[in-house]
Image (tube, helix red, strand yellow):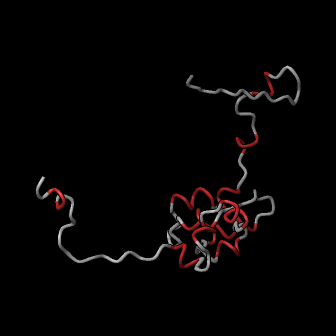
């Protein structure tokens, strides 16, 4: 097949230089072996506002959420936080892991038994867990 090797060539033009991955700018001394090791990732989790602020520019709302006393623990691996655009407060990955002060406000429905489990329980305080497993045999 003559000419097949040129079928997928890039069109002529200016080469665009990709910016370096955030990993190399934030953790320059970390080897590929370390970066790809789940143990290294877990042992270097970021979990305080101060740690996270070294990587992202936190909004006032996010800073306020980290100051809340009864906040669930926030732990994020270097890999996962490196996926976040540090300048975009609406980054979808950021929204999944960085709390905001609006999320800290209690509301009535959050304390209610939305599935009416207490009312239908044969024993007070008993919670039933149903495990559904889909398997191909």
**Residue most extreme to the front:** 1
**Quarter of the view holding residue 120:** top right
Q: Residue at x 52, y 73 (%)?
A: 22
Establish if 68 lies above or below 30: above
Residue 80 image point, x, y percent: 59, 62
Between 66 and 41, the one nearer to me in the picture:
41
Q: How many marks?
A: 0
**Quarter of the view holding residue 55:** bottom right
Left or right: residue 25 versus residue 6 is: right
**Residue most extreme to the right:** 124
Q: Residue at x 61, y 75 (%)?
A: 30
Q: Residue at x 60, y 76 (%)?
A: 27
Residue 29 image point, x, y percent: 61, 80
Between 3 and 20, the one nearer to me in the picture:
3
Residue 45 image point, x, y percent: 70, 66
Q: Residue at x 20, y 64 (%)?
A: 9
Image quarter hosting the C terminus: top right
Left or right: residue 84 versus residue 10 is: right
Left or right: residue 73 versus residue 56 is: right
Establish if 121 lies above or below 20: above
**Quarter of the view holding residue 25:** bottom right
Residue 17 image point, x, y percent: 34, 77
């Amino acid at each position: 097949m003559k000419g097949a090797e040129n079928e997928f060539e890039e069109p002529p033009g200016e080469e665009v230089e990709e910016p370096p991955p955030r990993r190399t700018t934030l953790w320059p001394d970390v080897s590929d072996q370390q970066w790809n090791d789940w143990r290294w990732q877990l042992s270097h989790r970021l979990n305080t506002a101060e740690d996270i602020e070294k990587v992202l520019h936190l909004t006032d709302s996010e800073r306020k959420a980290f100051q809340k006393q009864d906040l669930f623990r926030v732990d994020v691996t270097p890999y996962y936080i490196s996926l976040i655009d540090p300048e975009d407060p609406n980054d979808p990955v950021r929204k999944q892991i960085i709390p905001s002060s609006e999320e800290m406000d209690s509301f009535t429905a959050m304390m209610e038994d939305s599935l009416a489990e207490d009312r239908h329980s044969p024993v007070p305080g008993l919670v039933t867990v149903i495990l559904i497993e889909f398997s191909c045999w």
